[in-house]
Image (cartoon, helix red, strand yellow):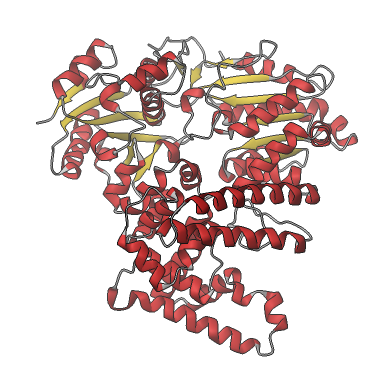
Amino acid sequence: MSTQVENNNIDDHVDDTIFECLDLDNPKSLFLFAGAGSGKTRSLVNVLSRLRDAQGHRLHLNAQKIAIITYTNAACNEIQHRLGYDHLFSVSTIHSFSWDLIKSFQQDIKKWLEINLKSEIIELEEQEANGRSGTKASIDRVRKIASKGDRLKNLEKIKKFTYNPNGDNRSRDSLNHAEVIQITADFLSNKQLMQNIIIKKYPILLIDESQDTNKLLMEAFFKVQKKHSTSFSLALFGDTMQRIYTDGKVDLGQNIPDNWEKPEKKMNHRCPKRVIKLVNKIRAGVDMQVQVPRVEKEDGIVRLFIVPSMTVNKIEIENKITQEMATITGDELWNSPDIKTLTLEHHMAANRMGFIDLFQPLYNHERLKTGLLDGTLPAMQLFTKKILPLIKAKKIRDEFSVSHIVRKYSPLLDSNLLKKSENQLDNIKQVNIYVNELYSLWKDNQNPKIIDVLQFVAKSKLFTIPEMLHSIANRTEEEQHIVEQGESTEDRDDLIDTWDNALSGSFSQIEAFDEYFSGDSKFGTHQGVKGLEFPRVMVIIDDQEAKGFLFSYEKLFGAKELTKTDLDNQHEGRDTSLDRTRRLFYVACSRAEKSLAIVAYTQAPVLVKSYVLSEGWFEEEEVIIKS
């Protein structure tokens, strides 16, 4: 339910509480609960502006700053803009913040990498000694051992490590995203000097979207705060109901220390009354958090359309539902082709847009999933930021863009290499030959395999191949033939197998993938739209199409019973498929500013209707079964 309030200022005291905690003389730490549409960013900016007025001069004198960690570059830019780009505030993503902390510890970084690489090589060598030679797994392992061995030998030559939080870090002296996070967490947890640096430089640290911040770093921040509680404030902003990524700290909201403040924002400024009532019901099974609407908010309209899962033409039925919503709401804009359609699982969008063969293997691998979703996976950046733009530019004969891409990214045109070259013009001509040979893979409207594109790029050295793909990219024809035979053996490297499966599809899937994750398609997901809002939202639920074992809407809607694994996980306090599904549904529904249509495909339409009515999620007239 949602309770009506008399004014829109019921959360004003929350900003006061946060401000009082961030006192340099008497610091306290806090966890702010801020549900969907609660104005979290506005509170953040209000408090920071007050801190600037009250303590800015003192911080400047001590050469100190207030650090704010946000999840995306877009969020960084928004906060910096609202704060007038004041240098008192260090606003950055977690990767940028981490690199800024560790980049001066060059020898420590080298030692950490040396230990880590040696450990990985020993593990691979043990696997190779116990495995069968001549198999795909053996070929892949040998190449990985060689690649890591080369990197280990190269460590001695590296004078300074580099890192680009927004790039793919292709040079031999660069760190990758995962390493930066792991090193930072290790140093913060175990190096007193690193702890001293962070509390002296940033006596106040605010973390936005803390529920999705890497758990290793969150645990390290908690250690620093506990040890230095009299001189360091840690302020966490978030909502555990909106946790999306799997590397976040699962129990964040449950284990906040007793001496922390725990303010809560109650108002939802975004959604109409009916949507707020629904999202309150959705999260009622998780916690006691209840939001209220703004005084002037309209009632809004919600409908649940239940469709048999065996329906053949789903796009057609969804188009008819948008027409029906236009009639129900009296809002002709429901007939617009750009209605925001939210799929509750990426697989559904991948199916509809034609990149499922690329997406599914990567998404199902725990080590790759988060990087795939947040755009930091170096192997995908090779395709989306270099090869795809290059081919697009060639197709429209934009030679200026072609030249810009190869000059920016190709190691063959590296400035140091060109300086050593006796004939720079020959280098440039050779690169042009390689570009044209690469583009020839698309001649006569062909759609080459991703792996063929990768192996050409590796052979020509047109772009640097990320370490993760070395063993695949550099196979001989004979080795590739062995791989394609698909021999069955337990002696396999599941990470390389995953990439082999993902890269076996056509390159057009890269373009569809890029369109979807850059937000250029009509489809979106909970991950892509968290923090965003849309007047009219259609949420599509389809377990059969999603193919995800991590989620189950049939369970959430009462059409399937919980499994023994679900019950065991519940009993032991672990995340269940029901928990994950409820969170995704909450995030998607809470995007709507005016009206919301939910399309649920199910094998048991009558059972689903009966369940949602009994739970009080919907009224009888709001539930429509489509035949």
- Res. 507 visible in picture: no
Residue 319 horizontal side relative to residue 590, left or right: left
- Res. 168 visible in picture: yes
Q: Nearer the viewer, residue 200 or 173?
A: 173
Image coordinates of residue 504 in percent, x first then y, are: 34, 60
Res. 449 image quadrant: bottom left
Q: Nearer the viewer, residue 477 or 317?
A: 477
Residue 210 horizontal side relative to residue 52, left or right: left
For the C terminus, the quadrant is top left
User: Residue at 38% of width from left, 67% of height from top?
Assistant: 480
For the N terminus, the quadrant is top left
Res. 397 image quadrant: bottom left
Count of labels in the image: 0
Image coordinates of residue 26 in percent, x first then y, are: 81, 16
Residue at the far right in the pictured view: 61
Q: Is residue 418 above or below residue 378?
A: below
Q: Nearer the viewer, residue 273 or 408?
A: 408
Image coordinates of residue 360 in percent, x first then y, are: 35, 47
Image coordinates of residue 342 in percent, x first then y, are: 34, 38
Residue at the far left in the pictured view: 627
Res. 232 image quadrant: top right
User: Residue at 40% of width from left, 51% of height from top?
Assistant: 498
